[in-house]
Image (tube, rainbow, N blue to C red):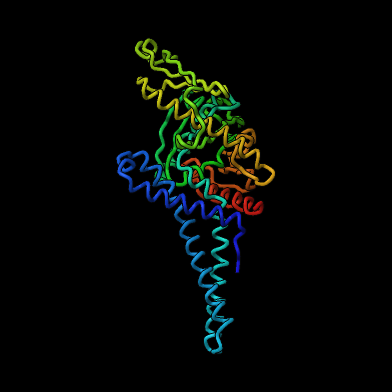
Amino acid sequence: MSTLPENLLRKLAEIEEQYAHLEAELLEPEVLADHRRVRSCSIRKAALQPLVERYRHWSLLQRRIEEARNVAAGENDPELVDLARGELDELETESAALFEELQSLLVTADDMAIGSLILEIRAGVGGDEAALWAGDLVEMYQRFAAQRKWSCEELDRSEGDVGGCKLCLLSVAGEGAWANLCFEGGTHQVKRVPATEAQGRVHTSTATVAVLPEPEEVDVQLDANDVKEMITTATGPGGQNVNKVSTAVHLIHEPTGIEVRMQDTKSQSQNREKAWKLLRARLYERQKAEADAERAQQRRSMIGSGSRAEKIRTYRAKENLVVDHRLGESYNLEKSLAGELQPMIDALVELETANRLADL
């Protein structure tokens, strides 16, 4: 029989308790009246459900295994002993298979429980072509989110001079959103003939993607007294009203120096809500990175700010291929840009799961 280590059993018991708490929370009238809390609780509950169901079934199997062993050891009737031993073999085979599933689900449970994130796509090296490339990546992620039926909201966008974007912030929410997109952080390199190239030469340009898990307000240590808030007029194009009316929100988290500016809408209240949302995400990311660093020797992880400086993927237009350097595998470029990222992401999840299991 495969026996789970004590530390994993404690973790599973904690997750089962979280699941029961979410079930109870979704029955509370004040939660049901708040559609945001309902969505958040539902996403987290759905993420934990496969793990909790398998853990409960595994626990049931352990009780049945113990009963079969007692019968096999204590019965005098040879026929009953044979039946008990036959049942014991079947139960232990099923338990061993479930043991493998449990471990895989357990090491990804924290990722699955994060249902929303912010994607920050920035043009890198390559001038106007880099901005066009960043715009292509934005559209790729929007298409992927649509295929997964996730919500995808544009929080902020700075347009490129000839198209595309210098910067775009996307808020993505849905079941498994973080678990799938957390591997996208890093430098994305493209080799192609730019639309801005008159002589047909292949250029190499880059865009960087940052993936910030968006926490619940209760999950991040943020004291409003530590935040300096300023309301200013918006800058850039937009007409007289945008540049004269004070609607832009500028937040500074003084202990860390993290700054957020938001002027995406003409509404000061909407800009404030978006600015605080982004500030919480950036602060949570820093707190999570610090916690990950403390565990770095015990657990390898693809999540974290360190991987962003690395080239994770090259998109080759001539060969119609995208190469993920972490996997050493190639995928169809046209399909990937159309949002069909799931095969590549599934392979990354499998690789990371194997790495985490090796570190248990």
Tell whether 22 sits left or right of 325: left
Q: Nearer the viewer, residue 314 or 41?
A: 41
Q: Nearer the viewer, residue 186 or 205?
A: 186
- In this view, the residue farthest toward the right is 297
- Residue at (54%, 89%) from the top-left corner? 77
- Residue at (55%, 27%) from the top-left corner? 123
- Residue at (65%, 39%) from the top-left corner? 294
Q: Nearer the viewer, residue 245 or 107?
A: 107
Residue 189: percent from the left, percent from the top?
60, 35
Residue 284: percent from the left, percent from the top?
53, 33
- Residue at (46%, 49%) from the top-left corner? 18
- In this view, the residue farthest toward the front is 74
Q: Say if residue 168 shows up in the picture.
A: no
Figure quadrant of residue 104: bottom right
Q: Looking at the image, how many numbered discs can be counted on the residues?
A: 0
Q: Nearer the viewer, residue 114 or 28?
A: 28
Examine the rendered structure and indicate whether residue 160 appears above or below residue 107: above
Residue 49: percent from the left, percent from the top?
44, 54
Residue 63: percent from the left, percent from the top?
51, 69
Examine the rendered structure and indicate whether residue 225 appears above or below residue 72: above
Examine the rendered structure and indicate whether residue 40 appears above or below residue 99: above
Q: Say if residue 69 shows up in the picture.
A: yes
Examine the rendered structure and indicate whether residue 206 appears above or below residue 297: above
Q: Which quarter of the image is occupied by the N terminus?
A: bottom right
